[in-house]
Amino acid sequence: MKITRIDSRREHLPLTRPYTIAYETVSAVTNYIVEITTADGRRGFGAASPSAHVTGETEAACAQALKAENLDWLMGEDIRRAAALLRALGQPMEATPAARAAVDIALHDLFAQQLDLPLVDVLGRVHQKLPTSITIGIKDLDATLEEAKEYIGQGFRILKVKLGRSVEEDIARLILLRECIDRDIRIRVDPNQGYDIDRLQKFMAQTQAFDVEFVEQPLPVNEFGALREFDSTFRQRIAADEGLLTPRHALDLLTPSPACGIFNIKLMKCGGVAPALAIAQIAEAADIELMWGCMDESIISISAALHAALACPATRYLDLDGSLDLSRDVVSGGFVLRDGELSVGDRPGLGVVPFD
């Protein structure tokens, strides 16, 4: 059960559908794949998708953190001591949360395999399956409608719409979208820090009748605390994303009173499953709802996030569509997507199967 080999590599992954958000257009992503092998031949997989804009972690920093000399301390360690090993990842990889997440995920995968259980059952399954949203980037009205109808035809019942360029255009786009799709299709929006308080108030007021489920990170991180000036009904429909990186940030968002009603946990922001579960416990204690989100990521890390999400009582929302537009991946399996709902299978660990 001792670790005998650790490998990492860079994978360039083009997208089948490039998209635009408030601050960039994305047509391809870089993931770093980690594989940890034990003496009995088991292989655990992890994946990193660094985001310099969100966490400050560049691709170069992620690659450096995953070099062999920085992971040699894990060689010879017993995977049954996973809890201690996961704790030890924190300090040396504090500045590279995606790299930490890749190692964390691989260790969780191996530990659950050793127990011959899906990771969700090791963590304590609460949910069997949950619906995920699927994301529409910033587009003109016609392209938004066309993509929405395509996704609804595929069985998705929740659309997440990227906003943040112009509040007037955003409002017009949301109103038209809602008028053209059934009311049982949920809509949530993400301005990616593109609003100020006045624009946010205008958006909320003028879309009130159009069933916008919630608004994700509408304000810049350094202005998010201003939401405490509004009543709890207003704040309940706001989700923190870029402003929530670590358990410490979760506590800050709750003090002296909650700035929002929803936490968006992403493994690439916080450093993997272990710190994600720490955030989830804080949220549960404070009656904060959880959404589990992602970057553009391999099935490996999307599966890890799903296993964690299904094991948390506070989980209410999924936004785990990050692998669906990759033109290729390095594994199959991991999760089951059916009619817009995500679940996991019965294979031990993450349940992923490498292409090799």
Image: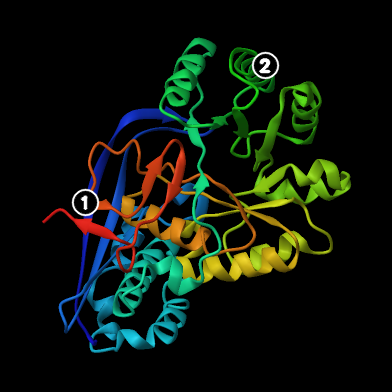
| Labelled disc at residue 330 | 1
User: Does 277 appear above or below 73?
Assistant: above
Left or right: residue 204 versus residue 136 is right
Q: Quadrant of the C terminus?
A: bottom left
Picture coordinates of residue 265, whole percent (x, y): 56, 56
At horizontal 65% and vertical 43% (from top left) the residue drawn is 217
Residue 263 lies left or right of residue 39; in this view the side is right
Residue identified by numbered label 2: 175
Q: Tell me the number on the disc at residue 42.
A: none
- Which residue ends up furthest to the left in the rendered image? 356
Disc 2 crowd rating (10 Å Cα; few below 14, some 14-19, many 20+) is some
Figure coloring: rainbow
Look at the numbered disc 1 and give the secondary structure of its residue.
loop
Distance of label 1 from label 2 (alpha carbons): 40 Å
Residue 104 on image: x %, y %? 39, 70
Q: Amino acid at mark 1?
A: Val
Q: Secondary structure at mark 2?
A: helix
Q: List the single residue furthest toward the top.
A: 142
The first of marks 1 and 2 along the sequence is: 2
Amino acid type at circle 2 is Ile
Mark 1 near mark 2, Cβ–Cβ under 8 Å?
Answer: no
Residue 155 position, x and y percent, is 45, 30
> Relative to 178, does residue 329 appear above or below in the rendering?
below
Q: Residue at x 69, y 30 (%)?
A: 212
Q: Quadrant of residue 33?
A: bottom left
- 38 or 115, nearer to the observer: 115
- Residue at 58% x, 71% y is 278
Q: Position of residue 34 (x, y in %)?
A: 26, 65
Q: Which picture quadrant has residue 118?
A: bottom left
